[in-house]
Image (cartoon, grey):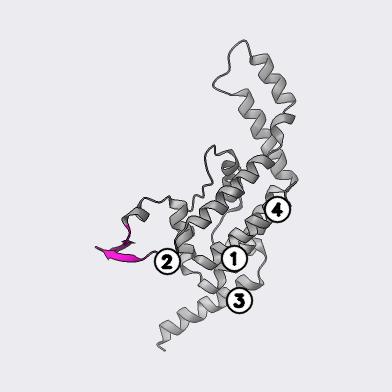
Amino acid sequence: MKPHKLIFTTTFLLLGVCLAAARPVDVMAELGIETAKLQLDILLNLKEPKRFFFNATDAMRQLARRVPASSRTIAVRMLGRVVRAYVESDLFKQTWLQDVRTASLYDDSSTAENTAQQRQLSADVDAHTDFRPLLKQRLQDFIMLTELVDFEARLVPVGNKLEFANPFYQHKSSEWKFLYRLGQEPVTEARLFAEQWLAELP
């Protein structure tokens, strides 16, 4: 094996060992995921009216490509733990409550007549503080999305890039394509994690 290939292979083997032994926060650092951005994405996902979405940065996509396939499942499992721990934390509940109050105060549909009602709502938002129905919906959306990904889809060279042989897949969402690139085993792990979390929600 050539020296540069040996260094390349050794680096990824070491990364795999590090991912296997690391704490979730360490994995986030390894993958270049900022805590603040992840927390914001979690909040935005729950507020998204139509579907689950995940906004991967270019840096995250590049790092994900470089992580060995054998380590991706471990990384996904640890990131899942990070997400769940945050959603179940007091910090998230406070953030959610503040967001609900802010939305009720600055609703574009507000009129002079219902301003008092809006203020009362901001003081007592019990009807809106339970984010679990939205969480259940997002987990269901994610599970459904993972089941629709065709991991056997072929790629063909088109110019200097690869595109799906089936043109139908070219129009899939960026989330679908990200899961395709991530691979079947890590996505299966993510689906199992989501299914377990969903089953344990009251």
Q: Crowdedness of circle 1 by 10 Å Cα count: few (<14), some, many (20+)?
A: many
Label 4 sits on a secondary structure element that is helix
Front of the two marks 3 and 2: 2
C-alpha separation, residue under disc 3 versus residue under disc 2: 28 Å
Q: Is residue 148 visible?
A: yes
Q: Residue at x 55, y 65 (%)?
A: 186
Q: Which residue is mark 2?
A: 152
Mark before the other along the chain sequence, 3 or 4? 3
Q: Which residue is mark 1?
A: 75
Q: Which residue is mark 4?
A: 199
- Snapshot quadrant of residue 6: bottom left
> Would residue 121 be counted in the magenta stretch?
no
C-alpha separation, residue under disc 4 versus residue under disc 2: 29 Å
Q: Crowdedness of circle 4 by 10 Å Cα count: few (<14), some, many (20+)?
A: few
Mark before the other along the chain sequence, 4 or 2? 2
Q: Is residue 175 above or below residue 133?
A: below
Mark before the other along the chain sequence, 1 or 4? 1
Could you say where residue 126 lies in the image, as x and y percent from the top left? Answer: 74, 30
Amino acid, disc 4: Ala
Front of the two marks 1 and 3: 1
Q: Crowdedness of circle 3 by 10 Å Cα count: few (<14), some, many (20+)?
A: few
Label 2 sits on a secondary structure element that is loop
Q: Which residues are magenta?
A: 154-166
Mark before the other along the chain sequence, 1 or 3? 3
Front of the two marks 3 and 4: 4
Is the N terminus in the top left, top right, bottom left or bottom right quadrant?
Answer: bottom left
Amino acid, disc 3: Val
Amino acid, disc 2: Glu
Q: Which residue is mark 3?
A: 17
C-alpha separation, residue under disc 1 versus residue under disc 3: 11 Å
Q: Is residue 166 above or below residue 106?
A: below
